[in-house]
Amino acid sequence: MSHVLVTGANGQLGSELVEALRSRHGPSGVIRLDLQPPPGPDGHAAGGPFVVADVRDREALADCISQYQIDTVYHLASLLSATGEQHPDRAWDVNMEGLKNVLDLACTHHLRVFWPSSIAVFGPSTPKADTPQKTVLDPTTMYGVTKRSGELLCRYYHRRYGLDVRSLRYPGLISHKTAPGGGTTDYAVDMYTSAANGRDYTCFLEPDACLPMMYMPDAIRATLSLMEAPAEALSVRDSYNVAAFSFSPQDLAAALQRHVSNFACTYASDERQQIADAWPASIDDTAARTDWNWTPTYDLDAMTEDMLDHLQEDERLREDEGVRG
Ligand code: VAH
C-alpha cells in the first residue's frame, strides 16, 4: 500500500488534495503534516494520521517519512505572495529550506515529489498575453523569487540525482472548502463569499486587473494527472505552465451579479496591486496539454454557479445552527 505525505495539509490546496488522495490511497495512506493540528472536529475530513511539524525541521520530516513508510511527498507548505512581502526572510526560509529538506530526503529515501510553483515566477518583462512555457522570468516578489529558485532546484535534483520531482505553475486557485491565506488572487474567494452572504465587497485590486485563475477541482485533477503521467512523457522538469481561464475583478463582479442581482463591488487597491501588475494576464499551457493531456473543465460561469451553490448552502447551514442555538 502506498503512503503519501502532504505538507501544508491545512491549506487551501492541501485540504482538498488530501481528500482526493484519500480516495486513491485510503485515509490511513495519506499522512498530513502542518504547523498546527487541523482546525476543529468539523474541519477537514476527520481521520488519518496528522503530524505537527515545521518543514524547516529536517529531522522531523525524516522521522515522519520513516515512521509512515512514505513513497510520495506533495510538498505544499509555503508562504504566499502577499504574506511573503510582509515577511520576506521567513518566506525564503520556509519556502527554500523546506523544499531542499524534502528534495534531499526524497533522494535518500527514493521518493517521488510534487511541488507547487506559481505564475508568480513571471515578472514585468514577461509577455503578459499567452505567457510561454519558456520565457523571461523576472519575479518581483520574494514569493516569486522562491518559486523560480525552487523550480531550478527541482530541475537540478532531477538532472543530477535522477529524482522524479514534478511541478505546476498554478494560477490563482479558487475554492469554497478552505479559506485561502495571504495570496494576491484571494480577492476572488473573498468576493464570492461576500456575494453568497448578501454583502457587498470592496476589492483590493483595480477593476481591470486581469489574472489567470483556476477552480480547485481542476487544480486537483491537473496535479494528479501530472503525477500519474509516465516519466518519459514529461519534457518540463522545472515547472509546467497550466491554465484554465482569466478574469478581472469587474468580470467576476458581473458574473456574480447574474446570480445575485443586488451584489455591488467597489474598488480600493492596495500594495497587492503592484504584485498583480507584474503577473501575466493569460498563460500558454501547450506543453501540459501535449505531454500529459491537460485540459480544464470549468470556465468562469460554471465555477460561479458551483461556488455560489456551495457557499449559499454553507450559509443556510450556519443560519440553521444559529436558530437551533
Ligand atoms: C498568491 N494564490 O496569490 C497565490 C498564487 C498565482 C497566485 O500563487 O500568492
Image (cartoon, helix red, strand yellow):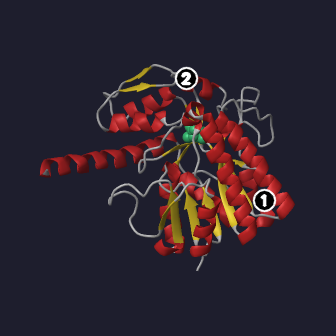
Q: Which residue is mark 1?
A: 234
Using the image, determine if residue 225 lies above or below residue 243: below
Using the image, determine if residue 89 lies above or below residue 168: above
Query: Quadrant location of ligand 1?
Result: top right
* Coordinates of residue 202 in the picture (x, y in percent): 40, 24
Tag 2 near tag 1, CB within 8 Å:
no
Residue 110 appearing in the image: no
| Count of number-bearing discs | 2
Along the line of sight, the residue nearer the viewer: 78 or 320: 78
Q: Which mark is residue 271?
A: 2
Circle 2 residues within 10 Å: few <14, some 14–19, many ≥20: few
Q: Which mark is residue 12?
A: none
Circle 1 residues within 10 Å: few <14, some 14–19, many ≥20: some
Q: Quadrant of residue 311?
A: top left
* Coordinates of residue 124 in the picture (x, y in percent): 72, 26
Q: Amino acid at mark 2?
A: Glu
Q: CA distance from mark 2 to mark 1?
A: 37 Å
Of circles 2 and 1, the one toward us is 2
SS type, badge 2: loop
Q: Amino acid at mark 1?
A: Leu
Precedes in sequence: disc 2 or disc 1: 1
Task: Name which residue lies at 57% across and 74% down.
Answer: 67
Task: Name which residue lies at 48% across and 41% down.
Answer: 181
Along the line of sight, the residue nearer the viewer: 144 or 26: 144
Looking at the figure, which quarter contains the N terminus?
bottom right
